[in-house]
Image (cartoon, helix red, strand yellow):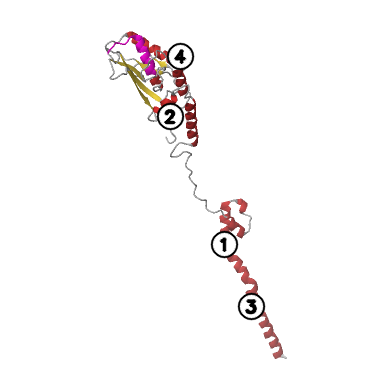
Amino acid sequence: MLERRILILVAALVVLLASAALWNAFVRRPARASASATPDTASVESVVRTAGPAVDSAPDTARAAAQPAPAPAPTVVPPVGAGGPSYIVLLARSEIRRRIRASAGSTYLSDIVAGSTDSILHRWDGRVSTPVRVFFPPTTVANFQPSFLDAVRSAFQRWQEAGVPVRFNLDADSSSAEVRVQWRIQFEGERSGQTDLQWDEDGHLTGGVVTLATFDAKGQPFAPDDVRVLALHEIGHLLGLDHSPDAGDIMYAQPKVRDLSPRDIRTASLLYDLAPGPLRVGS
């Protein structure tokens, strides 16, 4: 009877030990696996939070997929017209050329552009409220007469009366002058005057020198009215005009008339109605 009880106790002990082994194998081991996954989960969450709180409540797989990809390097787009004129500039030049061609019957601006070496319109800009400063240096040139100054002033006034939007201050001093009117006895060849201009890269006139002779090409002395006509022609150059092919215009290479013609006035008016600068497509 005692031996039977001992066998029962041993059997019970074996069952107890077997149950403990089964508990360790199937219940406690998954709990250790879950604990070891915690650092990875925390790490993923910390990354997602830096991307924004809206993704923070998503499952781990969704959070990992929601992480933003690195932003691509910005694309540098060159400005319109880089390396050449913009479309708007080319369109404006085309319109200017169209207007010049359309005026061929009433002005000689198309002849001026066709005969130029740079196809650039030159003109003074914004010189109504700020007149161009003109200086008359004293001179001892032979046949110079004080009335010549009045003749030149009258020529400046005539261009202003014609409606050209440029005004001149004819009492400037040498230090502030932009234009000088000077004298010489005679030129070589048939001409009796010369105008040298300065302009910036956009065609805006910035200065000039007008030189007038006191004797014509044959050695005959000029009278004051001759100087007035000569000055009318050279002031036309000073305003930005070149020669006209028509002998009826004051801007004919060797003037035959004594006053501005309607074509002179229309040509100057058109010049000052257009923008200065180059007209070539590739300029």
Query: Which one is closest to the eye, mark 2 or mark 3?
Result: 2
Q: Position of residue 131 (x, y in %)?
A: 42, 18
SS for dot 4:
helix
Labels 4 and 1 touching (C-beta < 8 A) = no
Direction from residue 244 to residue 13 in the image, left or right: right
What amino acid type is highlighted by mark number 4? Glu
Q: Position of residue 138 (x, y in %)?
A: 30, 13
Q: Earlier in the sequence, mark 2 or mark 1?
A: 1
Q: Using the numbered discs, state the Cα–Cα distance from disc 4 to disc 3 in whole angstroms.
A: 120 Å
Q: Badge 3: few (under 14), some or many (20 or more) residues near its Cα, within 10 Å?
A: few
**Residue linked to disc 2:** 277
Magenta residues span 219-235
Q: Main secondary structure of the magenta part?
A: helix
Residue 113 located within the stretch drawn in magenta: no
SS for dot 2:
strand
Labels 4 and 2 touching (C-beta < 8 A) = no
**Residue 129 shows in this picture:** no
